[in-house]
């Protein structure tokens, strides 16, 4: 099974475990879309914005002397956008509705980000 299919399987399983998740995508740290399971947004644009957000969040974490960036959550009136570091070369962005339990989101998405990070790091260049 190819890496993209494995990543898509991880995203689909996350959505099954968390029905409040409306979509998820994986992007490289430079903003290129790796895989997406999201509707209603421009996946390529969201990947690029997530990577820019990741870069800013990494600088904020370093500026505060708190170590490496791990995750960030943006709360909006209609829901949440959570971005997780997926290794050193990728990120996982999750879109969820406003009623999601954030603790459960973190509990479920963190291991997905770890697995996705390994998959992306192992893919051929």
Image (tube, grey):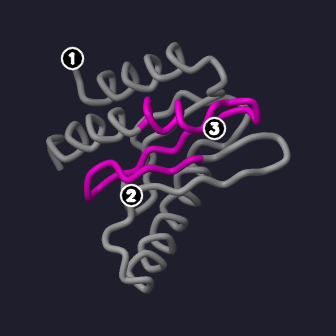
Q: How far across and down, in percent of the image, does residue 11 sit? A: 44, 26
Proximity of marks 3 and 1: CB atoms separated by less than 8 Å? no
Mark 3 neighbour density, 10 Å: few (under 14) some (14–19) many (20 or more)? some
> Could you say which disc has been placed on residue 49 in the image?
none
The answer for how far apart the CA atoms under marks 3 and 2 are is 17 Å
User: Which residue is at the far right?
Assistant: 77
**Could you tell me which quadrant the N terminus lies in?**
top left
Q: How far across and down, in percent of the image, does residue 18 sit? A: 56, 20
The part of the chain drawn in magenta is: 82-109
Q: Residue at x 43, y 17 (%)?
A: 13
Secondary-structure class at tag 3: strand
Question: Does the segment drawn in magenta span residue 102?
Answer: yes
Proximity of marks 3 and 2: CB atoms separated by less than 8 Å? no
| Disc 2 target residue | 70
Q: Residue at x 75, y 30 (%)?
A: 99
| Disc 1 target residue | 1
Secondary-structure class at tag 2: loop
The answer for how far apart the CA atoms under marks 2 and 1 are is 28 Å
Using the image, determine if residue 30 lies above or below residue 80. Answer: below
Using the image, determine if residue 18 lies above or below residue 47. Answer: above
| Disc 3 target residue | 95
Which comes before the other along the chain, label 3 or label 2?
2
Question: Does the segment drawn in magenta span residue 8?
Answer: no
Mark 2 neighbour density, 10 Å: few (under 14) some (14–19) many (20 or more)? some
Secondary-structure class at tag 1: loop
Which comes before the other along the chain, label 3 or label 1?
1
């Amino acid at each position: 099974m190819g890496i993209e299919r494995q990543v898509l399987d991880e995203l689909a399983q996350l959505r099954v475990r968390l029905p409040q998740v409306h979509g998820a995508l994986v992007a490289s740290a430079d903003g290129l879309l790796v895989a997406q399971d999201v509707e209603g947004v421009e996946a390529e644009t969201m990947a690029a914005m997530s990577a820019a957000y990741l870069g800013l969040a990494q600088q904020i974490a370093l500026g505060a002397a708190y170590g490496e960036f791990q995750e960030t959550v943006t709360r909006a009136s209609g829901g949440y956008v959570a971005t997780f570091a997926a290794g050193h070369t990728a990120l996982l962005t999750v879109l969820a509705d406003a009623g999601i339990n954030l603790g459960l989101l973190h509990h479920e998405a963190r291991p997905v980000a770890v697995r996705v990070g390994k998959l992306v790091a192992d893919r051929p260049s």
